[in-house]
Image: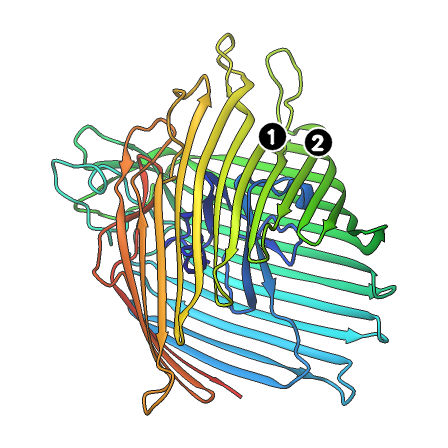
Amino acid sequence: MNDALRNVPGVTTVFGSPGNSEESSFTIRGFEFANPLRNGLADPLGGRSLELSNIERVEVLKGPASALFGNGSPGGTVNLITKQPLATPYYALEATVGSYSYYRGAVDLSGPLNDSKTALYRLNVSYKDAGSFIDFAHDKNLLIAPVLSFAIGERTKLTLEGEYIDADTNRLTLPAVGTVLPNPNGKIPRNRNLSGPDNDKVHEDIGRIGYTLEHKFSDNWSLKNAFRAIFYSFNLSNSFNHDSLDPDNRTLNQQFSNGRFDDQAYNLATDIIGKFSTGSIKHQLLFGFDLSRFSYESLFNDADVLTPIDLFNPVYVKPIGASFSIENNSFLTDALGIYVQDQIALSQNLKLLLGVRFDAFKETDGDLVANTESSQSGDAFSPRFGIVYQPIEPISLYASYSRSFTPSIGTSFDGSLFEPERATQYEVGVKADLNQRISTTLAFYNLTRSNVLTEDPNNPDFSIQTGEQRSRGIEFNIGGQILPGLNVIAGYAYTDATITKDNTYTPGNYLNNVPKNSFNLWTKYEIQSGSLKGLGFGLGLFYVGERQADLENSFQLPSYVRTDAAIFYKQGQLRTQLNFINLFDVDYFESARSILRVYPGEPFTVQGTISWEF
């Protein structure tokens, strides 16, 4: 996921670096995003232990997407499209070996189950066992993903999908003092593990099962009904959370804890899509609704005493004889969404998009220790408007307006319920096909997040919804085949993401983990003829500018340029490849959560892959 999104302007990694791979999260246009959609359905656990061996492609939708998908990040969303069964037999084997004891194998099998090819299957299985540049860190991931599809007559298709992930990983960070910031005691090595060889272990089990039913009433009208159930178990053992750093700048106080989550999610969505005309005006109408439920129960035991550790001479101990406080909480949300969208072709070169969605939700929170419960409900309308004009066929000028919402649970001092957070975006841009092989996009946007919770100045123990954040930016990307065998993907993003209104943080502060300037380039050349035909080379440059590490803007993460490279050879059904990550071993930092939690980037790494398709 990280590798794919590095080539998307305006997207930066927040969480998911090596040694912390149980969750992936990113910023899109300045706002954090964690859980991608899967085949267009919401997946509240989509960012957990991602394994892409059963993923066909990764789609990125910029800006608020609530008009189609319900509540979500203001900056955008990611949609993962899973691999589907093929009518022609297909078999692929892949093996990868790399630095830090990295081993991964994958199998992809597909084909018909009967002679008439009305029943098809696909099976993806992968296993990864990998060390890390961080001491004692280890990552294991097993994926099994079967898919069956059945043609029920000429107009109906039923697809059944399952997925199981068994994952083990770690949660490891370093403090800023001694890494990003100077420390009089010296520099903390980026491979330093402050938890120890047997601590900060995360185990996850994820199960997904569902179906998609598609039916064509005619050539112009169709129905799609999809359901997915998700079951998730998270276990955290012997975790050390960074609490404070002593004045000697070497003694880090940590809180020891153990805990678990058990989550369940259900999502049912139905779409009706129709094409019709009103005179010379053509319409493509989408009407649909979705029902969802998400619940979890958590149990955490936190030590009541802090455990110190020397940053420069760590001795790994556990708090013996400490008492523990217990947190046992539950959460349940039910939601209904109804949406309609019309894509209108006023003429061959002028198109409109009109859409609106209504969402109603109810959330219930429970404290199982205190035996208390509170609930809250709300609703929101999310409109969407777009226009595309083509002065000439290769050029498309567009403008759009969209809104999104995120539920905000709680009450103010006077007892009134919080309204949902809202996000509003205005965007204009141009898309151009420079020729049949090269396309480019230039976008300008203004995105405002409102109803943000901030401290009540008259009642400091309460919050009010007067906070506001704004992101304004420019994004440019170009991609395609420059010459026979030479392909390029390049992009640049300027993102000015700031706090505009707040009682807790200073207005004018920048949003954290958001670089003002970022640039990506990946170019690949494959020899087209001669005895070396099939030999190719790839080179990538990724620049991420300096960015604030917290909303207080108390310190910055420095800018960096990472260089990646690849050598590959394709001959018939065989492909071999060498990837060089961080070719010049640049010491950089991916992101930060606070002054005590900084995520170092990956050092120079080599991975070799061999694959065979037949």
- Taking the spot 26% from the left edge, 48% from the top edge, the residue there is 560
Residue 154 screen position, x and y as percent: 84, 75
Query: Furthest-bottom residue in view?
Result: 531
Dot 2 falls on a residue whose secondary structure is: strand
216, 431: nearer the viewer: 431
Question: Which quadrant of the view contains residue 149?
Answer: bottom right
Q: Count numbered badges in the picture.
A: 2
Q: Residue at x 43, y 26 (%)?
A: 499
Q: Quick check: marks 2 and 1 in contact, CB under 8 Å?
A: yes
Residue drawn where x is 71% and y is 62% of the image:
210
Q: Is residue 413 above or below residue 205?
A: above
Image coordinates for residue 437, horizontal then vertical, percent = 48, 67
Task: Report if residue 310 is visible in the image.
Answer: yes
- Bin the neighbour count of mark 2 within 10 Å (Cα to Cα): few under 14, some 14-19, many 20 and up: many
Q: Classify 10 Å Cα crowding around label 1: few (below 14), some (14-19), many (20 and above).
A: many
- Judging depth in this view, the residue of 482 and 522 nearest the camera is 482
Amino acid type of the residue tagged 1 in the rendering: Arg
The percent position of residue 593, horizontal first and vertical second, equals 38, 38
Q: Which residue is mark 1?
A: 422
Disc 2 residue type (three-letter):
Ala
The quadrant in which residue 131 appears is bottom left
Q: In the picture shown, does residue 341 fall above or below 512?
A: below
